[in-house]
Amino acid sequence: MAEWQKIKISQFLKEREGRYDPGDEAVLGFKRLNKIDFSGEIHLSDKGSKTDMIIVEPGDLVISGINVSKGALAVYRGEEPITATIHYSSYAFDERQIDIDYFKRFVRSQSFVQALKDQVKGGIKTEIKPKHFLPLEIHLPDIESQKEIVSFFKGIENEMDDLSGEITHQQSFLKQLRQRILQEAIEGKLTTNWRDKNPDLLSGDNHASKLLEKIKTEKERLIEKGKIKKDKPLAPITDAEKPFPLPNGWAWVRFSEICEIATNCVSPYDYPNHAHLAPDNIEKCTGRLLECKTVKDDNVISVNHLFYPGMLVYSKVRPRLRKVAKVDFEGLCSADMYPLVPKCNPDYLKIVMLSNFFDGEVYRFDNRVKMPKINQDQLGVIPIPLAPLADQQVIVERVDKLMAMIGELEKQVSERKEQSEMLMQSVLREAFAKG
């Protein structure tokens, strides 16, 4: 390979100068560059902008000052000029000195990032402008060597694309497998063999209908004592609302028949060191609690709901994200959440609420607004497949075991993805190191 030369980027790129007010006649009637995606494709728009503009001529190299290091640069191949906001810059380039496919890969390399750190005073935090970009000195091979490097990269990238596609397929499969397990759990299919071996645990007083009777009796007692209000009458569950048959010993019930929405509002100033939960503290679709801060550290100033160990917390905002989790500590949750008191196994109810079946029920109440919510009445009428308590416990244990196995597989797939990205960075580093 030929000797590499140390040259300034300005030697092969010449900035297209000119800055225009959006209403300037010079830019009126031109389409606007909307974005350059990370694959290097230009997307245009007919919409105007309130930001000052530049003009991009056919054949110019256009660079996103915000996302250049992620690959957001492209040669504009149109026949008419276009405009772009001043967050972009446009350049004529010397094809005798620079291969643009080579340059696209170079700006994604650590060599480019290091050059910015070494040569730009104070570093670059958000946006790379021409004044930062053009004076950079880089090591550049001759044009033929650049083309050879590009050819090498295309072969590597094809292999990486195949690997990325396989990883995406595996991630999708594991996500589907999670839902398949949840669905089989709430249909009773996951514990069929266990029920065949333990018929006595599912009949008589152990039948789900008996559990429901006990719950109703306790509610009536609390109503008589004035501790809770009487529920609104619930319509019987019709056959049309039962999407699948249930095993013997199970029963269809309304959500509000087996779960109470707690209303224990408190002042956050009385609980400064309690944990504080908001929807963002629950991972979507998995029921996994994420790290949370205290009430004081989250700077909570409005009234919140106090919850206790053994309860569920459920996001009523954007409910189709399935943000529901069981808590084993005392804390406060935001007004965007319902603290729930299950009258059955809380882990079993969480399984039901994470399922595609429950999501389908929630979807019926999706009001298509920007920030959809589910209210208490809507949540309360959702039909729930209720298993006997013994069956609930076995379901929870088996789902936990299977989800742990899937979690380990997902971790391995994620590590493969990280390793492939690290490999590409390593190749980039070696390819663009000083020759």
Image (spheres, rainbow, N blue to C red):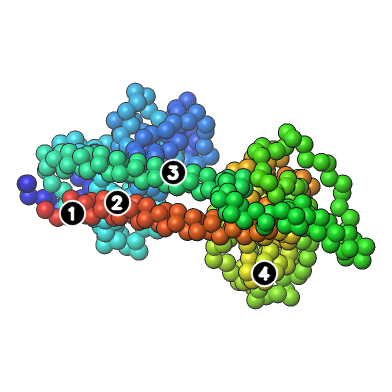
First in residue order: circle 3 vs circle 1: 3
- For label 3, the SS is helix
Give 366 or 125, whichever is nearer the viewer.
366
Mark seen at residue 430: 1
Give 141 or 347, whichever is nearer the viewer.
347
| Label 4, label 1: how far apart the Cα atoms are | 54 Å
First in residue order: circle 2 vs circle 3: 3
| Label 1, label 2: how far apart the Cα atoms are | 15 Å
| Label 2, label 4: how far apart the Cα atoms are | 42 Å
| Label 3, label 1: how far apart the Cα atoms are | 35 Å
**Image point 44% across, 40% down: which residue?**
85
**For the residues bearing labels 2 and 3, Cβ distance under 8 angstroms:** no
Mark 2 vs mark 3: give the one in front.
3
Residue pointed to by mark 2: 420
**Image point 11% across, 39% down: which residue?**
144
- For label 1, the SS is helix
Give 4 or 406, whichever is nearer the viewer.
406
Place of residue 269 in the rendered image (x, y in percent of width and height, measured from the top left): 72, 74
Q: Is residue 247 visible?
A: yes
Place of residue 349 in the rendered image (x, y in percent of width and height, measured from the top left): 66, 55
Place of residue 351 in the rendered image (x, y in percent of width and height, measured from the top left): 61, 53
| Label 2, label 3: how far apart the Cα atoms are | 20 Å
Residue ranking furthest to the top? 79
**For the residues bearing labels 2 and 4, Cβ distance under 8 angstroms:** no
First in residue order: circle 1 vs circle 2: 2
Q: Amino acid at mark 4?
A: Pro
Mark 4 vs mark 1: give the one in front.
4
Q: Residues within 10 Å of mark 4 (few under 14, many from 20)?
A: few
